[in-house]
Image (spheres, rainbow, N blue to C red):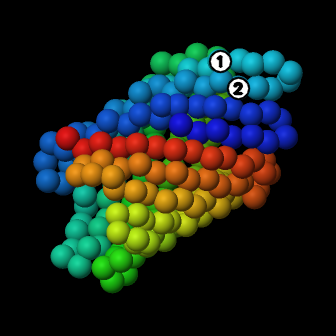
Amino acid sequence: MTYAWGGDGRVLSGPELLLRYGVRRRLELRLGVPDLARRWAGGRWSDEVGDAYIGAKVALATRPEGDALGLIPGLSLPSGRTAGSSRSADPELKVTASHPIGAEAGLSAMSYGIWASDTGQRRAVLQQTASFDRRLLGPVDGFLEYAGTFTTATPDHVLHAGIEWAIGPGLQVDVHGGVSVGRDRAPFIAAGYSRRF
């Protein structure tokens, strides 16, 4: 779940649920359940339902040293309503890369493009992320991340940090937060949970 606030209001959203199923060593299928959001803006609350998501992840290259390169094609489906939905099927493509630094740290990056619907017209949205993660103590890792979103409008930049705690075999919780340093200047805090079956 994520809670964000800024000059134009605040919003609580969740469950941000992504189901991933490995069908081959280098292939996984992905299904994103629509998010629910409660938004405060203009002196009143409103409820929104986001769009569903289908996609896949393909491991293009892996090395014994831990380097990896992946490709994630996907498609959002217009299952939501109100402002939470683009009301159109929006294709996207992500290219991911990771590189270990010794046994305790690593670097990763992602280039992300989506052909998004906006007031009945299509526009390209490009995003670049770069992150550094490191083992902090036992089962606890920490990370720092930068994300830049670039469109025909003013770019937006987000600084993001958090911790991840492996609480048991196949179980992980995380707490993280960040702030936009671009046009919105909107801080956010979030918490997540993952389970491997």
Work out whether 136 lies above or below 19. Answer: below
Task: Determine whether the residue tagged by mark 1 lies in a helix, strand or loop.
Answer: strand
- Position of the C terminus, as image quadrant, is top left
Image position, residue 61 (x, y; %): 24, 66
**Among all residues in the image, which is located at the extreme bottom?**
102
Q: Which residue is mark 2?
A: 39
Taking depth in this image into account, of 16 and 184 the one nearest to the observer is 16
The local secondary structure at tag 2 comes to strand
Residue at 52% of width from left, 44% of height from top?
191
Q: Viewer-proximal residue, 2 or 8?
A: 2
50 sits left or right of 10 in the view:
left
Crowding at dot 1, Cα within 10 Å, few <14 / some 14-19 / many 20+, comes out as some
Amino acid carrying mark 2 in the image: Arg
Whether label 1 touches label 2, CB < 8 Å? yes
- Residue at 60%, 59% in the rendered image: 160
Residue type highlighted by circle 1: Asp
Percent coordinates x, y for residue 107 in the rendering: 43, 73
Residue 8 visible in the picture: yes
Residue 82, quarter of picture? top right
CA distance separating discs 1 and 2:
6 Å
Q: Which residue is mark 1?
A: 47
Q: Residue drawn 69% across and 32% down?
A: 11
